[in-house]
Image: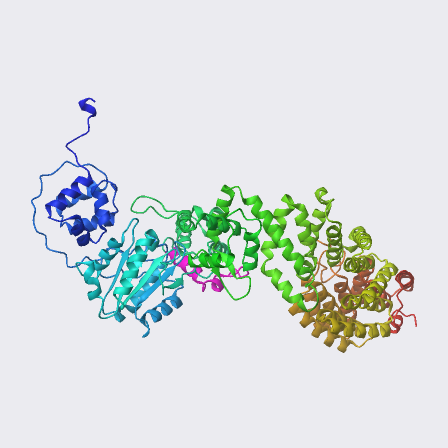
Amino acid sequence: MSPDHAPDQSRVGFDELLRSRRLAAGLTQAELAARAGVGVRTVRDLERARSSRPQRTTVDLLVAALHLTGAERDEFQTAARGQPIRPRPSIPRQQVPALAAVTPAGGAGTEGDEATTELPEFGRSRGLPPPGELIGRDCDVAELAGLLTATDHTGGLISLVGLAGVGKTSLALAVAARIVDKHPGGTGGIVITDGSTVSDVLTATATVFGVGRTNDLAARLSGEPALLLVDAVERAPAASADALHWLTRAAPALRVVATGRHPVGLPGERVWPVAPLEVPPADTEADLNAVAGYPAVQLFLARLRQVRRERVHPGEVGALVGLVRRLGGLPLAIELAAARGRALDLNEIFNRYGDRLLDLAGPPSRQAVAVTLRDAVAASYALLNPAERRAVRWMSVFRNRWSVELAEGMLAEEPPVGEHIDPVPFLDRLMSLGLLGARGVGPYRFRLIDVVRDLATERAAAHGELSAIRRRHAMLFARLAERSTTDLAGAKLVATVNRLDEVASDLWAALAHSANDDPHTALRLAASLPRWWRFRGRDIAGRRWLRRLLDDPRTVDADPAVRAWGQVGVAQLALEHDAGPQELPAARAALATFVALGETAGELAARGALGAACLAAGQFDEARQHAQAALALAGRTGRVRDMTLAQHTLAWHEIRAGELRAARRRLAAVDRLAARSGEDRARLLARAHLAEVARLEGRHPQAVDLGRRVLAALTSLGDPSHRRQVLGTIGLALAQSGRLGEAGEALSELREQAVPAEAMDLRSVGRAEPSGPPDDSRCVLIEGTIAAGRGDRELAVEWFAVAARAIGQGPNPRDAVEALVGLAANTETAAARSMVLDRLAEVCRETGITLLPHEREAAGLS
């Protein structure tokens, strides 16, 4: 090697400089470590050049312990930054007096990750840095302070456990500040570093409590209560556990608060999970005043004010709520996202990071490394063993809250050899690590922290597991939906609907995944959901899914019964938005399949759907025949509920035909059968028909009163389609009795619940003159009746004409008859009136309707 390329022997590194300064001070490695408040291993590794770039805080501690000033200090700090220096003359050995105390240099803590809220390293201070602003932790602080100062609390260990970035250190500092005067024996804090030994931990503890040797700790802490905060125990779990076990036994008056991503694991340890901050519910109004009280929003706004002066604009509130919900209330994540507010508005932050929150990074640390949210979450994920990590990946598919049973279903099916996991202790471990949240007392109370779920989904994709996970998820929810089908009727209806509501996002996700990957499972799932979809007003979306799956060539060879239930479901859903006639072929095919299979329940359901579809298509005789056949089949097989439904349908046919006395008798039978079978909803619908009977009989006040009572009960149950029917009865009864103002209010409410335009190509009818097909047959009848009640016969004729032109477009032909009667009553010319009466007679012949006495009188036929 040429002289030009030879190493510069005249320059030294930090390792040599540290050793020379220590020796010049006459100190051993252990003595320097104790004086500086760092671990012996830290000094040893630095002198052996195993750690050539120490933390800045460590350098500051060593500078103070070695009493370096001026040029010596600058030289020492320069070498610590990795810049070689020329050696200075050796410093003579001298005795340096021991430090009495080292004041903390850590700043105020924040609610973010432990990296932003620093306790001093080993023994850096006998005191603690002041707590920073803490948001949303008042209850935790109060309860922990009470627990640590209770008269029966004579020492021991409390572990604050949670995900990285959840604010464990901030909480510990706030609790310590609250109870510092209750610990006359002193308070202190240490931070565990990687590779720490039991000796390191005990030496640092001795230093913060002002004793020279570990053996003196027991005597020092034997008197009045003292408090020790131990941060980041997961960095050296075995050493931390052994040291704290010795401390709690040797010093019963010592109270220890440890923070970490997992419990220490000592007998008698009190584990305190630190949960993310509360976020607004999904259905919260996008109004700043409505969401500002949630802790997650409070923290975001507080951090946002640090980087921008402008207040949150109303147009940003939706993005604000979306962000804190996607961030799962994790303080570190919230702080990282809010920091982007210096350059971006909230909508831009959400659009840019909403789907890649794990990429959020904080500013570079003292080691010039920008720590991302992904790094923080991955650190907690890494604490799990391989089987546990796999289990988390498989549960990351859940979109919302889930139950122990669902977790068991995801984990118990065909697990790889040696990887079976009992879900109960596994969920307990996830909660103890802060990776899993639980809220409420119902079965669906567990939820992976959002950012944990995002990371686990990424890891699942990297392992090539996503397709298998989604397939199992879809099969799991298909079985859940199939089990729920029988309970979507009768006394269990409301509870079952609510239970499905809780897993709605998973049901939709399973349907979307399996429709492409496993259409047979998708069809099983969709064929089990029509009753839920109908009850919740999702008939349009549900019908589209079923029609897509039934038309998919890959489902042609599916189980015939499953296909038939899908065909029944698509017909039932079509009826909800007046498209029943379009699905008559599907209903007929389902009936044929169930008859061939000898499946009674399926045949009854198919006859019900087919009868309703025939009714909507104007095929009234066939519709009545299906109802009579269903009643006979239900009677032969002893199916009380199906007998109730058939009797209910036949009562409607009698109402349609004007056989009101027979309808009343039939509805009384429905009431008795429904009471026997626990069909409260069927009883309500029977009373809704009784309200219609009362209206047709001209007993309008009774119709309004009964209708309103039924409406209130249906509102609590849901069921939007039947609510529209009852509202129509009430509105017409009010208009026909001259209560026009109340009729107008009912009309407005009815229009708000009208069938969406995407399902019926109907436009809203204007107040002045109708200009197209009606939005609802009852809406038009009410409009015409109100106009007639006000004496505006011309406008009434216009409204009734619109209704008359819509004959055959709705399921109730009596509405068309009433429209023609109203048109005849308000038409002034004899020729036009004669044409209306001819049309009225034709409709009555086609539909088998008999005019009621008051209708004949109004039309001028009596």
Residue 278 makes an appearance in the image: yes
| Residue 9, image x, y percentages | 16, 31
Q: Is residue 555 above or below residue 823?
A: above
Q: Which percent across, then down, holds residue 462?
A: 49, 41
Say if the magenta span includes residue 288: yes
Above or below 156: residue 513: above
* Quadrant in which the N terminus appears: top left
Q: Quadrant of residue 785?
A: bottom right
Judging depth in this view, the residue of 34 and 119 nearest the camera is: 34
Residue 826, position as x, y percentages in the image: 84, 67
Rendering coords of residue 61 (x, y %): 20, 51
Residue 743 or 632: which is nearer the viewer? 632
**Magenta span covers which residues?**
280-305
Q: Quadrant of the C terminus?
A: bottom right
| Count of labels in the image | 0
- Quick check: 131 left or right of 756? left
Query: In terms of image quadrants, where is residue 528?
Result: bottom right
**Residue at position x 54%, y 56% in the image:** 407
Relative placement, left or right, of 99 versus 708 is left
